[in-house]
Amino acid sequence: MKILAAIIDEYIRTGEPVGSKTLAEMSDIGVSSATIRNTMAALEQEGYLDHPHTSAGRVPTFKGFRYYIDHLMCPEPLSVEKISQIDELLESGGLTDEAIVENAGTALAEITKCAAISTNHAAKFSVISKVEVIPTGRRMYVLLMITSNGAIKNKVCRMEFDLTNEQMQSITSFLNEHLCGMNVENMSEEYVNGVVAAMGSYMLSLSPLINAVYELSEEMMKDSVDVRGEANLLACREFEADDVMKFLEKKGELTEFLDDAFSGINVKFGEENGTFAISNSTLVSTSYYKDGKPAGTLGIIGPMRLDYRKIIPYVEYLSKKVSTMLSENESLEIENKGDDDDE
């Protein structure tokens, strides 16, 4: 185990195959070159190391990296200065739920020099807080929906006739009365049909606007993958540019693998399961929460030769920080709602 750890640490540092001579010169190994060579051969036979060329050097396989991460690695605690830097990056800009997650991705990409990836499930736990109908042209209207997590969605609707100001005010009041406070996750087709039926024959022709609310809710429920720091992938000399472009075109396919990260740090290797379009890559991800509920995933994609001792603490800290900030937002929403109810 000591020899495997030494090989991986040296390979992470240099990117070059590691030979027995290099290991023998390390003061903490304490065994002969012959023992080192025999051990390296055994580790290769067990699948932890690979012999890429005719040189005597070895490189770790994904199996070797996984054993190293699970059993041998000692994570480096974050310094006070690094925590301060992360907090400053995270708290810049807006502090809506969406902005918090986006800031976390930007901060993670900047600090790790990898591509940061995230999904945001917060919309599933948000409620509709405001609905507006805005005219944009002849028989054309934009339905604007704002949710409690700060998300703003809109959809263009084509009507069969122009609405009068009285009709716009009437439908806006009706929508807000029946939809505000409704959880996005519960906006089912059956519920929408019930609302349309409640409109009566007078307003039935305005039902496309309510259907637009349902369609926007459906869009919000679909998870999307946000990637920050794409340039870091293109700048990585261990990746082929074509592989990176294929990954960026199909990044949405990562959603199911990111969703597996709800049990602590999850490390997946591209060559381990053929998941990623980028060969020799690693996905390190974990979950973040809002008020105790899983709200999304956050992580990085980089080369397999990552300094996991530093990278994993970054991902862990940011996910915990995002969870705290999202939960504070939730508390503020509840407090504000209580104040409104008192009034």
Image: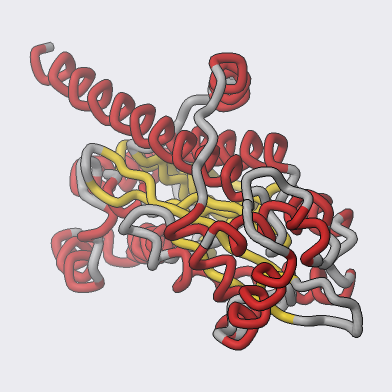
Quadrant showing the C terminus: top left
Asked if 130 appears above or below 306 in the picture, the reply is above
Asked if 254 appears above or below 10 in the picture, the reply is: below
For this rendering, which residue is in front, 272 or 159?
272
Q: Is residue 167 left or right of residue 224?
A: left
Q: Position of residue 251 (x, y in %)?
A: 64, 69
Q: Residue at x 58, y 34 (%)?
A: 103
Q: Position of residue 3 (x, y in %)?
A: 61, 61
Q: Is residue 286 left or right of residue 130?
A: right
Residue visible at 38% across and 62% down in the picture: 221
Q: Position of residue 322 (x, y in %)?
A: 42, 34
Quarter of image, res 39: bottom right
Q: Is residue 160 visible?
A: no
Q: Residue at x 59, y 76 (%)?
A: 48
Residue at the outermost left position: 342
Q: Is 193 or 122 nearer to us in this picture?
A: 122
Q: How is the image coloured?
A: secondary structure
Q: Nearer the viewer, residue 117 or 190?
A: 117
Seen in the image, is 211 located left or right of residue 116?
left
